[in-house]
Image (cartoon, rainbow, N blue to C red):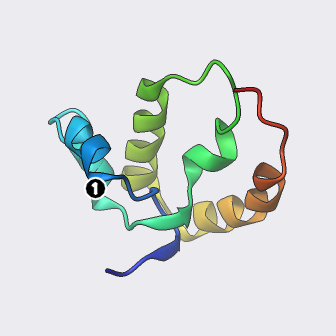
């Protein structure tokens, strides 16, 4: 399949089946990407909940824009090299 630079991270099948509820189905309206909103906001924090990750994916899918993509791309190098607290 096709993958974009910015989008929601593709999930393994076992995890995707957990997210295919009506509440989070909009997550799949965004393209799969190498980096995304979750990676630049909450990745590496010990207090991140799975709920918040799903909500960020839905937020990107429903409110994503070219400007948001540029912001995510700008923040990705800093997020990639951050100290993880998990």
Q: Is residue 78 above or below residue 43?
A: below
Q: Nearer the viewer, residue 22 or 45?
A: 45
Residue 30 percent location from the top left of the image: 36, 61
Q: Nearer the viewer, residue 10 or 55?
A: 10
Q: Residue at x 48, y 40 (%)?
A: 56
Residue 48 percent location from the top left of the image: 58, 24
How many marks the image carries: the answer is: 1
The image quadrant of residue 5 is: bottom right
> Which residue is label 1 attached to?
28
Q: Is residue 18 above or below residue 78?
A: above
Q: Is residue 72 left or right of residue 6?
A: right
Residue sitting at the far bottom: 2
Q: Residue at x 26, y 44 (%)?
A: 14
What quarter of the picture does the C terminus occupy? top right
The image quadrant of residue 23 is: top left
Residue 36 percent location from the top left of the image: 56, 56
Q: Is residue 42 left or right of residue 66?
A: right
The residue carrying pointer 1 sits among few (fewer than 14), some (14 to 19) or many (20 or more) residues within 10 Å by Cα, namely some
Residue sitting at the far left: 22
Q: Is residue 85 above or below residue 73?
A: above
What quarter of the picture does the N terminus occupy? bottom left
Q: Is residue 67 left or right of residue 59?
A: right
Q: Residue at x 42, y 34 (%)?
A: 55
Residue 47 percent location from the top left of the image: 63, 18
Q: Secondary structure at mark 1?
A: helix
Q: Is residue 81 above or below residue 33?
A: above
């Amino acid at each position: 399949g096709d993958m974009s630079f910015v989008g929601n991270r593709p999930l393994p099948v076992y995890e995707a089946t957990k997210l295919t509820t009506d509440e989070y189905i909009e997550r799949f309206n965004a393209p799969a990407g190498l980096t995304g909103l979750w990676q630049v906001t909450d990745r590496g924090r010990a207090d991140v909940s799975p709920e918040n990750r799903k909500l960020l994916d839905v937020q990107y899918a429903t409110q994503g824009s070219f400007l948001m993509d540029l912001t995510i791309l700008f923040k990705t190098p800093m997020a990639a090299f951050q100290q993880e607290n998990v």
